[in-house]
């Protein structure tokens, strides 16, 4: 079954405590991306990756890092989380040069 | 990034009614997509449009890519309770980067 998985699904943490949200896909897709969703703002792209070792900034990259060491995994790293990073985060994947992205189930992050 | 203006922000309708929502942008581009998000889940692609003027249907859903390449609409005919959710338009830019609209929250009363 084609899947995009994210872990954890829910996380409550404190300001400044480094965390990683994992994303994994089994569809052999080259393109992967991270979005955050906030009320009234829709989904905004944080970072994306065209292939292994190739990443680029989206619209709201500040405070986030990513890495793409393997094709199937694209973790999102918050080195020093702040309350304004409280949000719902989605990982998405697609075939190269395709806009038809498949989204994971989401990770709800609360930073206190 | 550039914003997409999606309207209306929310809709409350009776089962069986038709629904129409639209999205506009100040710039032209080559791709329009429509996604639906149900509570507690990630967005799911409904329709993808790649050519100006293109009209595409998916069951009771119909979407069109505006001739000016700056807008798109999505229609849902004969709505049913399971149509409830948030509908997002999105435009494709280079290398698969997507910019999303703010979303239309649809509520269907039985």
Image (spheres, rainbow, N blue to C red):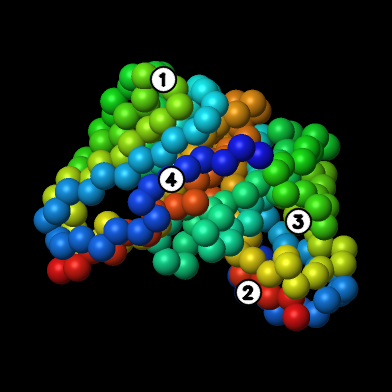
The Cα–Cα distance between marks 2 and 1, rounded to whole angstroms, is: 42 Å
Q: Please determine if labels 3 and 2 lie on a single subunit.
A: yes
Q: How far apart are marks 1 and 3 (CA)?
A: 37 Å
- Say which quarter of the image contains residue A14: bottom right
Examine the rendered structure and indicate whether residue B24 appears above or below residue B79.
above
Q: Is residue B86 visible?
A: yes
- The residue that mark 2 highlights is A10
Nearer mark to the viewer, of 2 and 4: 4
Q: In this view, does B3 lie to the left or right of A62?
A: left
Mark sitting earlier along the chain (3/2): 2
What residue do we see at 78% from left, 64% from top? A20
Q: Is mark 1 on a helix, strand or loop?
A: loop
The verdict on a common chain for dots 2 and 4 is no
Question: Do residues under tags 2 and 4 come within 8 Å of each other at their CB atoms?
Answer: no
Which residue lies under the disc numbered 4?
A: B6
Disc 1 and disc 4: Cα gap in Å? 16 Å
| Residue assigned mark 3 | A76
Q: Which residue is drawn at 77% across and 41% down?
A: A57
Indicate the position of residue A45 as horizontal and vertical percent values. Answer: 65, 46
Question: Between tags 2 and 1, which lies in front?
Answer: 1
Determine if marks 1 and 3 fall on one subunit.
no
Q: Is mark 2 on a helix, strand or loop?
A: strand
Disc 4 and disc 3: Cα gap in Å?
28 Å
Q: Between residues A81 and A30, which one lies in front from this camera angle?
A: A81
Q: Which of A104/A47 is in front?
A: A47
**Circles 3, 2 touching at the beta carbon (< 8 Å):** no
Real-space Cα separation, disc 2 to disc 4, in angstroms = 29 Å
Q: Is mark 4 on a helix, strand or loop?
A: strand
Distance in Å between CA atoms under marks 3 and 2 = 14 Å
x, y percent for residue B9: 39, 55
Mark 3 neighbour class, 10 Å CA radius: few under 14, some 14 to 19, many 20 or more: many
């Amino acid at each position: 079954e084609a899947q995009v998985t994210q872990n954890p699904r829910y996380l409550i943490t404190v300001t400044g405590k480094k965390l990683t949200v994992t994303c994994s896909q089994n569809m052999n897709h080259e393109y992967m991306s991270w979005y955050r969703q906030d009320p009234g703002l829709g989904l905004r792209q944080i970072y994306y990756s065209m292939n292994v070792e190739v990443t680029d900034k989206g619209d709201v990259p500040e405070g986030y890092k990513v890495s793409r060491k393997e094709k199937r995994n694209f973790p999102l790293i918050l080195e020093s989380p702040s309350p304004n990073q409280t949000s719902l985060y989605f990982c998405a994947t697609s075939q190269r040069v395709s806009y038809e992205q498949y989204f994971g189930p989401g990770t709800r992050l609360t930073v206190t | 990034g550039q914003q997409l203006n999606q309207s209306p922000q929310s809709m409350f309708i009776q089962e069986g009614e038709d629904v129409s929502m639209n999205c506009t942008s100040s710039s032209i581009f080559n791709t329009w997509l429509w996604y639906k998000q149900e509570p507690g889940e990630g967005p799911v692609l409904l329709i993808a449009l790649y050519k100006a003027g293109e009209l595409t249907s998916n069951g009771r859903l119909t979407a069109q890519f505006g001739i000016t390449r700056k807008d798109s609409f999505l229609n849902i005919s004969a709505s049913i309770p399971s149509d409830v959710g948030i509908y997002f338009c999105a435009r494709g830019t280079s290398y698969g980067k997507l910019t999303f609209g703010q979303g239309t929250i649809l509520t269907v009363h039985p």
